[in-house]
Every structure is written in structure tokens, then in C-alpha cells.
């Protein structure tokens, strides 16, 4: 799959996943909400690690910074 996530997007996803984990292990969230949030956290971590978000691909979104093409030498 083509990568479509920039580094700041990956960091934000990891932070959100960690926050969900903290909320779960401190008992602030439980039950069905904890299960749904846990699944979302796992998805965030996996997509951050592989650098591709299927929803971004579906909607044509990319948070990757465009690399500048080197200008050819015209000497």
C-alpha cells in the first residue's frame, strides 16, 4: 500500500492510543465504550506503524509532505 501519513499524523495517533490505554487501565472507561475505544486505539497504532490509512486512501487524502524534486543541472 502507498504511504499516506506524515510524521505528525503518526505521532498524534500514537498519543491518542496511549491516552485511551491510560483511561482504560485507570478505570475511567469500561464496558462497551472501553472495547470500542480499545479497538480504535489498536487501529491507530497499526496504521501509524505501517504509515497508511485506508480511509485516507478512500478519500484521496495524504498528510505526507511533498518532496521537492531536484532541479536538473543546466550547465
Image (spheres, rainbow, N blue to C red):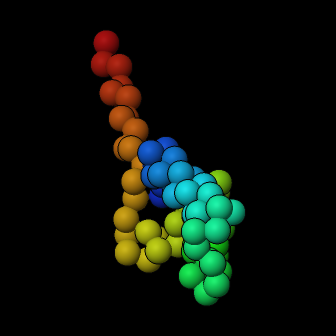
Question: Where, by quadrant of the figure, is residue 19 drawn?
Answer: bottom right
Q: How many marks?
A: 0
Measuring 63% from the left and 78% from the top, which residue is drawn there? 30
Measuring 39% from the left and 44% from the top, which residue is drawn there? 65
Question: Where, by quadrant of the figure, is residue 56 drawn?
Answer: bottom left
Q: Is residue 67 left or right of residue 46?
A: left
Q: Quadrant of the C terminus?
A: top left
Q: Residue furthest front?
A: 27
Q: Is residue 16 left or right of residue 30?
A: left
Q: Along the line of sight, which residue is nearer the eye, 28 or 49?
A: 28
Q: Quadrant of the N terminus?
A: bottom right
Residue 21 visible in the picture: no
Q: Residue furthest bottom?
A: 32
Q: Along the line of sight, which residue is nearer the eye, 48 or 2?
A: 48
Q: Residue furthest top?
A: 75
Measuring 37% from the left and 35% from the top, which residue is drawn there? 69
**Where does the image place residue 12, in percent across and percent down from the top left?**
47, 51
Residue 8 visible in the picture: yes
**Where does the image place residue 26, in percent across and percent down from the top left?**
65, 61
Q: Is residue 3 above or below residue 1?
A: above
Q: Is residue 72 left or right of residue 2?
A: left
**Where does the image place residue 29, in percent across and percent down from the top left?**
58, 73
Q: Along the line of sight, which residue is nearer the eye, 74 or 64?
A: 64
**Where does the image place residue 66, in percent across and percent down from the top left?**
37, 44
Measuring 40% from the left and 39% from the top, which residue is drawn there? 67
Q: Along the line of sight, which residue is nearer the eye, 38 or 74?
A: 38
Question: Where, by quadrant of the figure, is residue 47 drawn?
Answer: bottom right
Q: Is residue 73 above or below residue 2?
A: above
Amino acid at each position: 500500500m502507498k504511504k499516506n501519513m506524515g510524521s505528525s499524523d503518526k505521532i498524534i495517533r500514537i498519543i491518542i492510543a496511549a491516552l485511551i490505554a491510560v483511561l482504560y487501565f485507570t478505570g475511567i472507561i469500561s464496558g462497551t465504550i472501553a472495547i470500542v475505544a480499545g479497538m480504535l486505539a489498536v487501529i491507530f497504532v497499526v496504521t501509524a506503524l505501517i504509515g497508511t490509512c485506508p480511509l485516507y486512501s478512500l478519500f484521496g487524502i495524504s498528510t505526507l509532505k511533498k518532496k521537492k524534486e531536484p532541479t536538473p543541472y543546466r550547465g
